Amino acid sequence: MPPTTEESLGVKLRSDFPILHQEIHGHPLIYFDNAATSQKPQTVLDVLRHYYERDNANVHRGVHTLSNRATESYEQAREKIARFINARSHQEVVYTRNASEAINLVAYTWGLDQLQPGDEVVLSVMEHHSNLIPWQLIAQKTGAVLKFINLTHSGELDVDHYQSLLGNRTRLVSVVHVSNTLGCVNPVAEIVNLAHGYGARVLIDACQSVPHLPIDVQSMNCDWLVASGHKMCGPSGIGFLYGKLEVLRSMPPFLGGGEMIADVFLDHATYADLPYKFEAGTPAIGEAIALGAAVDYLTKIGMDIIHQYEEELTAYLLQQLYTIPNIQVYGPQLNQTNYPKNQGRAALAAFTVDGIHPHDLSTILDQAGIAIRAGHHCTQPLHRHLNAQSTARASLYFYNTRSEIDRFIETLQEAIDFFGEVFQK
Amino acid sequence: MSLNTVRELYQQVILDRYKNPRHRGMTQPIHRQQRGHNPSCGDTIQLTVQLNESEDFIEDVKFEGEGCAIAIASADLMAEALRGKPVGVALAMVEQFQGMMKGAEEFPQEFRKLNVMQGVSQFPVRIKCATLPWHTLKAALELTSPVAKDGFISNESDS
């Protein structure tokens, strides 16, 4: 017997999120767009507010009390993030605006510096545009060649195909940990291991995994990992790049400015030690500190507990979606004998319903207070690959519940009936 | 869920045009051709226009492509309304349609069928869907050669 909603994690934790307690078009909000961004618990909002009300000052440059407070909190948050992903050192965590900036940082420093004409960069067809466009740009500048890992018939990363793409020209593998469209969890440790066999570096786009799964960069052994704060209960405008110390050391600076220097002359400069070498200008201080609070919040719940609860939600969501006639759910399916072939499936489902455009579905669901995403979710090449112009996507987090899934399914069926009714006349 | 608000948007005519569009296809011959694209959702339509000999009257408009109910119905109703209209009138209608989406006046009697799209103005995020065909039409009529050289027009700045 699955646990009843009364005792579920979602029911217990919902009260931490003020935004969830409102009505949209006269219906209680059901927020199922967590893969786009997550909501923020009161504790994170409090920390952000406290910082601006009590501690606001610039970091690393004042000797006064406020500057000291701001700097300490800012650096403590970095240490929290480092512990959260099991980095060896806080120096391996570079703050960025978001995950896109973190990928661009690697592309424009390591990529421009290291890639030669004919060098190969392996990506997958399921990449978010943010792990595709930077490499397209760098390939155009360097003459490097992009290669793409296909999907298996079950809608997962094809590891056999991946192996066949690796060779002596492979310099970089940059792949997503959890697909924001297929929901598949890719076997990143195996991916890294295989790439390292050819001396290639590996970047993991962990935007959809860091908020939902326990992450250990040491056991993953990736060279870089990127994530965004706003998808993990933190504010927007803050994300991070993890990089192995020796890898980050070998990279030239990215943006130039204050904070990232050691000694400056009119015609040249020396650069600060890690991680500051990559943090030019005044950073998003309050946002970084609030991200630290989000990490505290998630750690207190326990990432393994979040993951376990979300797996239950995922199974329930898929079972319920399967009861809808003429629906297609993308990615690995619950009833497949090989499920979970790789490492399971995240709490999201992109789907289409025959004859109804995802935008129309989303508009009708919104009228019932239900927020889902409709479109290509920044994975246009994947949508082309799946032969879908666009899809609807319900993406869940630990504060969602089975009863919300019930109401979502009920409303989805009503929306389908609404369109069906008209067409039959 | 109350379907009343939803019915204001998805009027019978819109759903009927979505399911059974009358003007899908390509004009024969093609005097103007333009692809329109909504980058936020990936929807794309392709308009073809047949003009009279002096190229100041629209003989026929047809569309191909994929889109939501709002975009398809809007394209179909637009194609119907434009047949036999002077190019200048068509361009003025583009302005008027965009105005209607912002809550301005309806179309006069002659084009009253277009007024079923008015409900979209209450759904700001869907206005782009309704204006996609009109935006594409404007680009098509402003072409000096029959086919757009640089691919398609995006309606991203239009809302």
Image: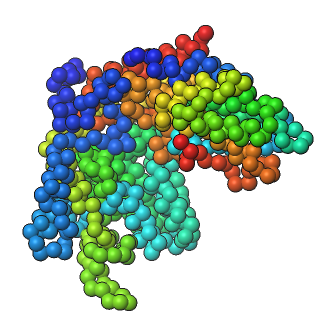
**Of residues A221 and B62, which is closer to you in this image?**
B62
A343 or A276: nearer the eye? A276
Residue A422 in which image quadrant:
top right
Q: Which of the two residues, A99 or B97, is positioned nearer the viewer here?
A: B97
Q: Position of residue A305 (x, y in %)?
A: 19, 38
> Is residue A30 depicted above or below B11 in this figure?
below
Question: What residue occupies the far right of the structure in this picture?
Answer: B53
Quadrant in the picture for the N terminus of chain A: top left
A25 on left or right of B13: left
Looking at the image, the residue that sits furthest to the top is A425
**A141, B32: nearer the viewer:** B32
Q: From the viewer's perspective, tell me whether residue A422 is left or right of residue A300.
A: right
Residue A150 visible in image: no
Q: Position of residue B10 (x, y in %)?
A: 54, 22
Q: How many marks?
A: 0
Whether residue A79 sits left or right of residue B68 in the image: it is left
Q: Is residue A418 left or right of residue B13?
A: left
Residue A350, how many percent across, how many down?
44, 34
Residue for point 64% across, 36% down: B96
**Residue at position x 16%, y 25% from top?**
A7
Q: Residue at x 41, y 70 (%)?
A: A110
The residue under the point 41% across, 16% down is B2
- The image quarter containing residue A68 is bottom left
Residue A400: give x, y in percent of width and height: 27, 31
A70 shown above or below A362: below
Q: Quadrant of the C terminus of chain A?
A: top right
Q: Is residue A168 visible?
A: yes
